[in-house]
Image (spheres, rainbow, N blue to C red):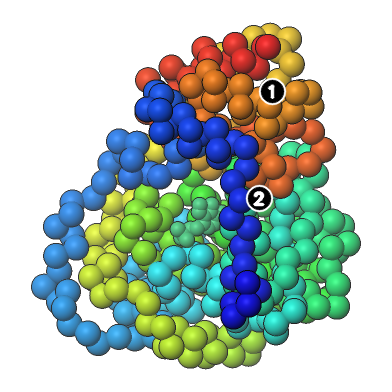
Amino acid sequence: MSGFSTRSDFPRAWNPLAKALAELRARGEPLVDLTESNPTRVGLPQPDPRLLSTPEAFTYAPEPLGLRFAREAVAAHLGSRGASVSPEHLILSASTSESYAWLFKLLCEPGDNVLVPAPSYPLFEYLTRLEGVEVRPYRLPRVHGFGLDVEEVAAARDARSRAVLVVNPGNPTGHYLHEGELAALASLCADTGLALVSDEVFSDFAWDAEPDRVATVAGRELPMLTFSLSGLSKVAGLPGLKLGWTHVGGPPAARDEALARLEWVADTFLSVGTPVQQALPGLLAHAPRFQAALLERVKENRRRLVAARPSGASWDVVPGHGGWSAVLRIPREPGEEATCLALLDAGLVVQPGYFYDFTGGAFLVLSLLPPPEVFESALGPLVRVLEG
Ligand SMILES: Cc1ncc(COP(=O)(O)O)c(C=O)c1O
């Protein structure tokens, strides 16, 4: 249709799975939803709502980078994870998604591109397109446990590539970036002028200890511009409060120029509400309680999933080290969509791997957030359908 921009022309046709799910929901069929990823809907601890009624809630005295003491609270939070950072190098936004949009405005001319991992979180395609930016996927090879292979990043790069995006740990693959991978990436970035954008929203949710794991790139001395992203949405399980942060690092002159430009972008929108900034120290103080409960939940559900797999089964739980999801590798036949439809018939909602751009086999993605009794109730039908 004329009169609209091409970047807002998203495909709206429903895929067969979405159609089948809508029909079942319209009929009121009971379904166990193993795609539930909203942390506020699965009975995990929430902070005291009185935290949001701050005495200064209606005072408007905005600072483009975010209120100073709110940035200090984020710096203290990162410090408790071993990253020594200055509040001066932090910028608050309404969400990690908004942080990405600001970074694309900062780094890219229309038509430039950013290198994105595949498989990964599906929002990059939309976030980039809305900024007139293109994506060039680099594969995370399954033989590396879906870890980063710098040769793949180098092969995906072209003259218009401005940044490489890393999701650490991967969503939904749960692979953390390791020191050797970061060193190789840093050298590629330094040689080619790529900035590093590191999405660390799941980094606090490690299931086990691993040597050489990189928890965050914030506070590290790296030779390229480095942006490390996270926010309340995952760290404290509070996506509705709309507060994310970006730490800017790298060579001081480039870092300071990036901060000055981002301050201008942020000043144009001033999108973070005052009450949430004022409540931030209290909300971050609650995060450990939320994270402990979530980790116990996720690890227990994963343990039950692995235990439910019959020996010699034709499917597998893909190894991972953190995050909120499990990935299953299933036989190529009948494949992802047919298996998801059969699971829907059995009352289970799961996601097909193609939502996350998996290739080289067939995969399913399950949320590990549902309460254990709900998750457990799904395992019988899941195994029955997968065993055909
Ligand atoms: C890897 C990853 N990054 C970013 C986000 C978006 O987070 P926010 O709610 O802060 O925009 C998500 C949401 O699921 C995610 O999975």
* Camera-nearest residue between 367 and 276: 367
Q: Kindly give the residue lying farthest to the top in the view shown.
A: 311
Q: Residue furthest left?
A: 55
Q: Taking 216 as reference, is 39 left or right?
A: left
Q: Residue at x 50, y 25 (%)?
A: 348
Q: Is mark 2 within 8 Å of ligand 1?
A: yes
Q: Which residue is mark 2?
A: 120
Q: Quadrant of residue 71?
A: bottom left
From this view, report whether residue 280 is shown above or below residue 258. above
Mark 2 surroundings within 10 Å by alpha-carbon count, few (fewer than 14), some (14 through 19), many (20 or more)? many
Pick whichever of labels 2 and 1 is earlier in the sequence: 2
Secondary structure found at label 1: strand
Residue nearer the viewer, 387 or 261: 387
Please provide percent x and percent y for residue 290: 34, 44
Q: Amino acid at mark 1?
A: Asp
Nearest the eye: 232 or 340? 340
Q: How far separated are the C-alphas under marks 2 and 1?
A: 19 Å
Q: Which residue is mark 1?
A: 316
